[in-house]
Amino acid sequence: MSSISRHQKYSENSGAHVQGSRARYPLVDVLRGLAVLFMVVYHFSFDLNYFHQVHIDFYHDAFWLGFRTFIVTLFLLLVGVSLHLATRFGFERRRYLRRLGLLACCAALVSLGSYLVFPARMIYFGILHFIFVASLLGLLMLRYYWINLFAGLGLIILGWRLQHPLFDLPALQWVGMMTHKPLTEDYVPLLPWFGVVMIGLFLGRRFFNESWALLGRWQGQRHWQRLMALGGRHSLLIYMVHQPLLLGLLYLLVGETVKS
């Protein structure tokens, strides 16, 4: 049976939403929507702190450090899952390049915007910059299965445990393994985070297939699930607009207390 006919049979049996040769899984959209919601909560709390409405140490407090790590981990696991799903029935070069170009433009806008707001802590390799690079490197790992799981775990351990002054050089800070956290508002280096994407590739191949058709049949019919799925389908748009909206709203309400 050809890959297309297997895809058609799986889509009919599982109930996964299909567009052309691509199946859309509500579960993935809901999980991404939850990650978006958590991100907005985190950034709104950060903005409240920026405007002196609360007092939170985002750089040392264990809860907020853990919350950020959880959000980034969920996002990047889904990057790996989505990359698998987007290519499992063939590589659509035009669609891939269009998405890559959009990521590059958005990452550049984030860097510019952060420079205007936080010139001393501008974002030069945040989550969008990372996803751009991971989307390129991830293509090299699509063919692998268990290797992605074990190599991904290895990269996570390597990135967390190994530090060397060489990676403190500005040209290498995007790699990770620095001896100190750089002065930037969002830092998602290649190591250890590409290991999370590789595990996402493994999870996508392991669970989103004919043997796990139940994941495709799950439709998420509750109102909050449909709302989360909608947010998950438009996660990049929400990412780009939520901070300007939140900062602008807070500035209108309490702008006189903003930090200099």
Image (cartoon, rainbow, N blue to C red):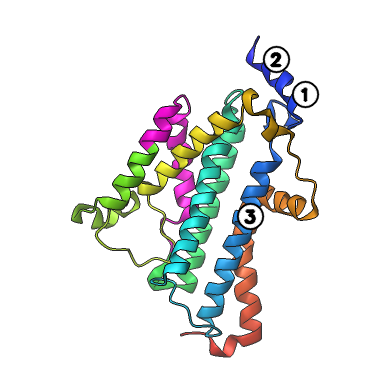
Which residue is found at the position 59% from the left and 71% from the top? 44
Q: From this viewpoint, is residue 209 visible?
A: yes
Mark 3: amino acid: Leu
Which residue is found at the position 28% from the left and 57% from the top? 170
Identify the mark nearer the N-term, 1 or 2. 2
- Secondary structure of residue under mark 1: helix
Residue for badge 3: 34
- Secondary structure of residue under mark 2: helix
Q: Which contiguous range is marked in magenta?
A: 123-151
Identify the mark nearer the N-term, 2 or 3. 2
Mark 1: amino acid: Glu
Identify the mark nearer the N-term, 1 or 3. 1
Residue for badge 1: 12
Q: Dot 2, how many residues are within 10 Å of its Cα: few (below 14), some (14-19), or many (20+)?
A: few
Residue for badge 2: 5
Is the stretch drawn in magenta largely helix, strand or loop?
Answer: helix
